[in-house]
Image (spheres, rainbow, N blue to C red):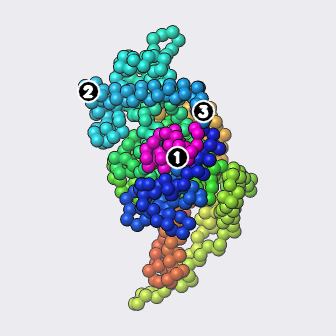
Amino acid sequence: MSLTPAFLDELRSRTLLSGLIGKSVKLQKAGREFKGCCPFHNEKTPSFYVNDDKAFYHCFGCSAHGDAIRWMTEQRGLPFIDAVKELAQAAGMEMPAPDPRAAEKAERAKGHHEAMADAAAFFTDQLSGIAGAEARAVLEKRGVTAKTAQAFGLGYAPDTRGRLREALKSYGDPLLIESGMLIKVDEKEPYDRFRGRLMIPIRDPRGRVIAFGGRVIGDGEPKYLNSPDTPLFDKGRTLYNLDKAAPASRKAGRVIVVEGYMDVIALAQAGFGEAVAPLGTALTEAQLERLWRLVDVPVLCFDGDAAGQKAAIRAALRALPSLAPGRSLSFVTLPEGQDPDDLVRTRGPAAFEALLQKPEPLVDRLWAHEYAAELLDTPEQRAGLKRRLADHANTIADGNVRQEYLAEFRRRVDDLFATPRREYQPRAFQPRKSGGKWTPPIPPATAQAKAVRAAGIDRVLAKAVLAGLIRHPAEIARHMEVLGGLKMVDGALGRLFEAVVDLALEDRALDSARLVTILGTSGLGQITTDLLRADAMPYSFTQDGADPKRASADLDEAIAIMVARPEVDAALATATAELEATTSDAAFERQMELLREQRALEERLANLIQANNDADEFEIEGN
């Protein structure tokens, strides 16, 4: 049968929602609405409201929301079509005539559902048997308890080509091939798709198994293998664990999106039952819509590595056209090298909850991404930042939200490029302490130090360090800490650094010439060439043919300065603000101490440059 939007709208209009819900929930009149205790979560004070005029119910405690049909499916547990039939009968409406093709499709779907349920039972039995010992060991190593494994229906696919086919032979090969459980190649015999893998059932919102994900046991590729799209399974419209996360999200008031199955399972075991995951692809518009039905602002919590953060920004850009007042995304960034599974196992649920309490709004994630995309030293580069931000905002369909984003980006750009305030100058006198002797103030920074600061010490030094690592790939393993610094300075440098590190770690014997060649073939050649120009930077480690020992020592010093400088600058800004507010002796002393530390760092950097110049002059004189 064909259920048109017009038919469903008429059905809703003929159904008195308060009368329907009042059959199982005690409701009281509250103005033009009715209120009562929510049936979806335990509460003593009524926060559940029913509005007959608008034909929906809403709970302000757990965010449960829906119309008459959703009430029948979620509270009564009826399948969608059964809910419609019951409401239509009560409203005196005739159901549309059956469509033979739809009936045939429904019958085929019924066979697929039964086959998938039997396949899940087969895999579960195998996990508990002798053949599943290695898979059980994997779960034990990852801290997954037997209770959790049972709750998620985890199983094991034997490492054979025909065990599942034999177990489900009553369904016939054509149905099993169509369901994705068997693979058919040319005229050869069909064989099991999943072999030697930990099996993870994928369920629809009603809890029925519609597909599987298989994780390899031990080494092998691909690490995860998903069912193909089938009559039951559309991976672009499905979220793993949605059937369990939907009710949990109403209680928690949030839904958490993570990258993979094991993250969801680990979080559920740690008490975060409101987690879901896409199925090996970037979040789609259909998946975002499903998330927004649960909460207004889902939390995206992807891995802290580069791939995870790229996935996060792709989701942000994909969400923009569908933003609406109150409807957005937020982001949690995990410590680099960790995923949610790692975090809750090593540091406990409290550490993960602490991150969830401080999510990053979508507008902040977009701003940070574009700010780091390229240098902002020239008018053209600054204009590029403005254009990219405006292009993003203009994809938002809702006019009010679009204007707010444009205004917010304009404000941030204006603040970023505004004429800087005059730098705070230390007082011309030293407060006298009891019994103490007056000492003259620290002299102002030298012209050389000011020139270094004006050029942007962090960005300039980051370029030099990256050039040094390209010149001396053997030093990379000792200097992994520069990753964070380079990423913060500039997105382009961050991407180049990531490529350099990946190549060097893959081949510890990689020399500079081969590294440059590989970078050239990967589209990073021009950036690399600019960094390695002989006149680009005045440091020993950036020069071709420099003494290796001296270059290594100078690179150590440069990295130490680069890491320390932002910390000193931040502390100095705090101390200066405190001095302006309190004018206390302690605040003045703290500011003086930090000014000395800042000058010392500038002098260390100047010494690196001077030492290199001295060496060049000596070499010229010697010749």
Task: Place residue 389 in its image quadrant.
Answer: bottom right
Amino acid type at circle 3 is Ala
Question: According to the image, label 2 marks what residue?
Answer: 129
Task: Place residue 606 in its image quadrant.
Answer: bottom right
Residue 90 has which mark? 1
Question: In this orientation, which residue lies closer to the viewer: 235 or 526?
Answer: 235
Q: How far apart are the two marked residues, 3 and 2, measured between alpha carbons?
A: 49 Å
Which of marks 2 and 3 precedes in the sequence? 3
Image position, residue 474 (x, y; %): 47, 39
Q: Is residue 311 visible?
A: no
Image position, residue 545 (x, y; %): 56, 40
Amino acid type at circle 2 is Gly
Query: Does the segment drawn in magenta span residue 573?
Result: no
- Residue at 45% in and 25% down: 111
Image position, residue 472 (x, y; %): 51, 41
Kind of element beneath mark 2 = loop
Q: How far apart are the two marked residues, 1 and 3, measured between alpha carbons?
A: 18 Å
- Residue at 65% in and 49% down: 321
Kind of element beneath mark 1 = helix
Residue 585 against residue 173 in the figure, above or below: below
Q: Is residue 375 left or right of residue 113?
A: right
Image position, residue 399 (x, y; %): 70, 57
Q: Is residue 387 left or right of residue 139?
A: right
Count neighbours of disc 2 (C-alpha within 10 A) and say few if under 14, some if 14 to 19, many if 20 or more.
few
Residue 154 against residue 487 in the figure, above or below: above
Residue 412 against residue 501 in the figure, above or below: below
